[in-house]
Amino acid sequence: MAEKFIYADNAATTRVIDEVKQEMLPYFTECYGNPSSLYGKGRDAKHALDSARGRIANIIGCDAGELYFTSGGTESDNWAIKGVAAANVNKGKHIITTKIEHPAVLNSLKALEKQGYEVTYLDVYENGIVRPEDLRAALRDDTVLVAVMFANNEIGTIQPIKELAAIAHERKAVFFTDAVQALAHVDINVGELGVDLMSMSGHKIHAPRGIGALYIRKGTRIANLIDGGGQESRRRSGTENVPGAIGMARALEYMTSPEGLAKREEIRALRDKLCDLLLKIPNSRLNGDRYNRLPGNLNVSFEFIEGESLILWLDSFGICASTGSACSTASLDPSHVLLAIGLPHEKAHGSLRLTLDIDNTDEDVEYIADCTAKVVDKLRQMSPLYEDYLKNNK
Ligand code: PLP
């Protein structure tokens, strides 16, 4: 076992913070009623659920009646895409998205393509950002939906959502953003942004897994994805996850409190320091935009090494990190995001994603940089490609 333990994979999931856990606990053991039950215990649970809804709505700038709890980001993404497509089929079957969306979006769209929908995938260029003029050019009279993620889960780049939503609306298309990575890390007000739908997930913001939400602007045409007993205003059935909803509300309140916002700036400074330290390693490059990215996100490629080997070595030093090459499916294909920003396969394979958050310290950053430099060097000593490179560059 390594002496140290440093968690630097907060884009994958986060620790449930103590105040979130404390506020959730009574809803497992005391206030465990079903919000649909008519007696007091049920009414108490319903009250708690409604209050969680109101607290989240207040922070993201919508009415409580426009926020629907789901099981997480994947469900919210599926619902937004399949639901809007199904409800607007009379207008058309064309959808626009980007090449760097999360698989929850891309695979929902793939399912629609099999049903005869046509999908346009926008480029994001070297900095990982969509150009508004490309969206304008891609819109058609039969475009029903534009789906552009708020911030990317691998390279952290933040899209010009307000501008993109306005362009989509000029052509009467519905605008959906997957804000799973952005929520609690950038300021979000759905009214100001002008988005019609926005997906969120609890476990990326220090609430537990199994809770998420979809914002649906009043008046947006959307079909149900999950039918059943008619919970969530008859739009998303299933007995509600009351503790999860409470936890999500508390986590979002913490992350957007003065303390949480101050931490956000500390995280940004730590990330910048780590970035500078890692880029001192020869033959390294930063992936994504230097500044227009999530505060905790860093994605760096090192030539002549495999990301998986790097991750395993870092794990042996007690560091939890991630690579873009194996993705969530354990396939050896390089990340579609890194390919979309123009990285050749060999560079995409040697990528490292570090995502810092509220627990990380200056000491962590120095330790991560130190270990990474050592491991990259060790792996390169074993690489025939690196040997060739050194010979050719003598
Ligand atoms: N969208 C993005 C951008 C994500 O990063 C993730 C999770 O990694 C998801 C959607 C899926 O969210 P969940 O894990 O809550 O299903």
Image (spheres, rainbow, N blue to C red):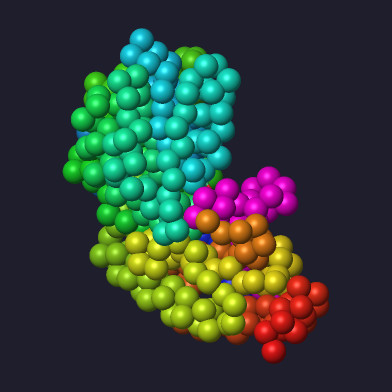
Quarter location, residue 379? bottom right
Residue 226 image point, x, y percent: 49, 20
Answer whether residue 154 is magenta in the image: no
Compared with 3, 190 (above or below) is above
**Which secondary structure dominates the residues rendered in magenta?**
loop
Quarter location, residue 325? bottom right
> Which residue occupies the extreme bottom position in the image?
394
Residue drawn where x is 36% and y is 10% of the image? 90
Residue 300 image point, x, y percent: 54, 68
Residue 35 or residue 126, whichever sits in front: 126
Residue drawn where x is 29% and y is 49% of the image? 160
The mark tally for this picture is: 0
Residue 32 image point, x, y percent: 48, 34
Residue 308 or residue 24, whichever sits in front: 308
**In this picture, residue 280 sits left or right of residue 140:** right
Residue 306 or residue 76, whichever sits in front: 306
Residue drawn where x is 24% and y is 44% of the image? 163
Compared with 148, 219 (above or below) is above
Q: What segment carries the magenta color?
A: 317-341
**In this picture, residue 210 sits left or right of residue 130:** right
Does the image show residue 145? yes
Q: Look at the image and tell me in which quarter the C terminus lies.
A: bottom right
